[in-house]
Image (cartoon, grey):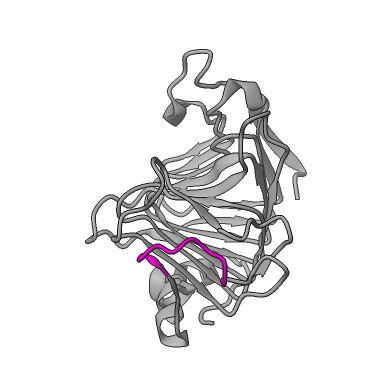
C-alpha cells in the first residue's frame, strides 16, 4: 500500500497556508497513483498539515495510504476516485470541494490532542449549482463528521460504521446547528455506529432511497466508467 512514500512536514503553525502544506499535489488531468503513501510528518500540534492535495480531473488512487493528523486529504477540485485506500487523521481529514467517490476504503481516526474531537469530513460545497461532494461506498468509517460549508454534501452508502461513531453523528462547523441547505445522507449502512435514531435533528440530514443513492455512484456522480476503466483499477459503477 505504501511501497513508495512521499512525505513532508509543512504546516500552518510554522507559517505555510493550508493549500501549500501538501508534499504531493496533483494539478494535471488523469493521474493514476497505485501502491503509494502520502504523509505529512508535522504532527497534531502543528494543526493543518495536508498529506496530499488533488485538483486534477480524473484523478485515481488505488491501494494508497494518506497519513497525517488535521486536514490529511485535500480533495480540492474536479473528479476523483479512491479505491481500497487507507486514510488516517484527526480533524476534518477528508475535505475540499471536488466530486470524489471512495470505494472499499478504510477511514481510520487517530488519537487527537486534549480538548479535540475526531471529525472525518468537511466538504466545502459553497454553491448549490456545483456538482461536488464526498461519496463513500462500501467503506469502513468512524467516528464524527463535520460540516464544511452551507451546501456541504456528503453521502455514505453500504458502509460500515464502527462503535466509535458518536450517536449524534455530526458536528456543525460553528455554533450549535447547521444550515438547512446541507445534504448529508445515508443508505443501507451497517455496524454498531450506523443507528440513526439519536442523530442530530437537522433538516439537511436524511436517509435516502436507492434511486437517490444511485446519483452518488461512480457512473452517475463522476461519470467514471470510461476513465477509471482506462486506469486499470477495479471499481463498481452502481450501487
Residue, x 41% and y 86% (percent of image)?
211
Q: Where is residue 181 in the image (x, y as percent from the top left)?
A: 29, 60
**What secondary structure do most residues of the magenta stretch adopt?**
loop
Vertical position of residue 224 compared to residue 66: above or below: below
Q: In the rendered image, which quarter is residue 3 located in?
A: top right
Residue 30 visible in rendering:
yes
Task: Specify the segment rendered in magenta.
Answer: 197-205
- Horizontal arrangement in the rendering, residue 17 relative to residue 194 (left or right): left
Residue, x 74% and y 60% (percent of image)?
163
- Name the residue nearer the viewer: 222 or 197: 197
Residue, x 51% and y 55% (percent of image)?
170
Asked if the stretch drawn in magenta spans residue 123, the answer is no
Residue, x 65% and y 27% (percent of image)?
44
Q: In the rendered image, which quarter is residue 51 located in?
A: top right
- Name the residue nearer the viewer: 73 or 38: 73
- Horizontal arrangement in the rendering, residue 136 relative to residue 100 (left or right): right
Q: Position of residue 8 (x, y in %)?
A: 63, 25
Number of on-image labels: 0
- Horizontal arrangement in the rendering, residue 203 relative to residue 106 (left or right): left
Amino acid at each position: 500500500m505504501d511501497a513508495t512514500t512521499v512525505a513532508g512536514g509543512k504546516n500552518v503553525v510554522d507559517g505555510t497556508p493550508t493549500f501549500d502544506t501538501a508534499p504531493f499535489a496533483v494539478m494535471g488531468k488523469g493521474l493514476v497513483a497505485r501502491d503509494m503513501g502520502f504523509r505529512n510528518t508535522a504532527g497534531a500540534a502543528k494543526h493543518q498539515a495536508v498529506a496530499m492535495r488533488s485538483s486534477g480531473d480524473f484523478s485515481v488512487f488505488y491501494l494508497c495510504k494518506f497519513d497525517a493528523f488535521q486536514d490529511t486529504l485535500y480533495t480540492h477540485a474536479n473528479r476523483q476516485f479512491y479505491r481500497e485506500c487507507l486514510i488516517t487523521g484527526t480533524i476534518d481529514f477528508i475535505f475540499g470541494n471536488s466530486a470524489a467517490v471512495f470505494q472499499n476504503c478504510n477511514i481510520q481516526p487517530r488519537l487527537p490532542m486534549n480538548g479535540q474531537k475526531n471529525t472525518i469530513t468537511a466538504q466545502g460545497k459553497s454553491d448549490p449549482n456545483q456538482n461536488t461532494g464526498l461519496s463513500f461506498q462500501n467503506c469502513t468509517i468512524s467516528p464524527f463528521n463535520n460540516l464544511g460549508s452551507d451546501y456541504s454534501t456528503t453521502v455514505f452508502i453500504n458502509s460500515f460504521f464502527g462503535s466509535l461513531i458518536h450517536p449524534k453523528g455530526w458536528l456543525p462547523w460553528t455554533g450549535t446547528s447547521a444550515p438547512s441547505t446541507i445534504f448529508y445522507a445515508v443508505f443501507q449502512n451497517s455496524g454498531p455506529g450506523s443507528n440513526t435514531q439519536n442523530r442530530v435533528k437537522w433538516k439537511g440530514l436524511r436517509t435516502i432511497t436507492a434511486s437517490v443513492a444511485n446519483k452518488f455512484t461512480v457512473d452517475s456522480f463522476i461519470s467514471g466508467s470510461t476513465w477509471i476503466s482506462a486506469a486499470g483499477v477495479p471499481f463498481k459503477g452502481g450501487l
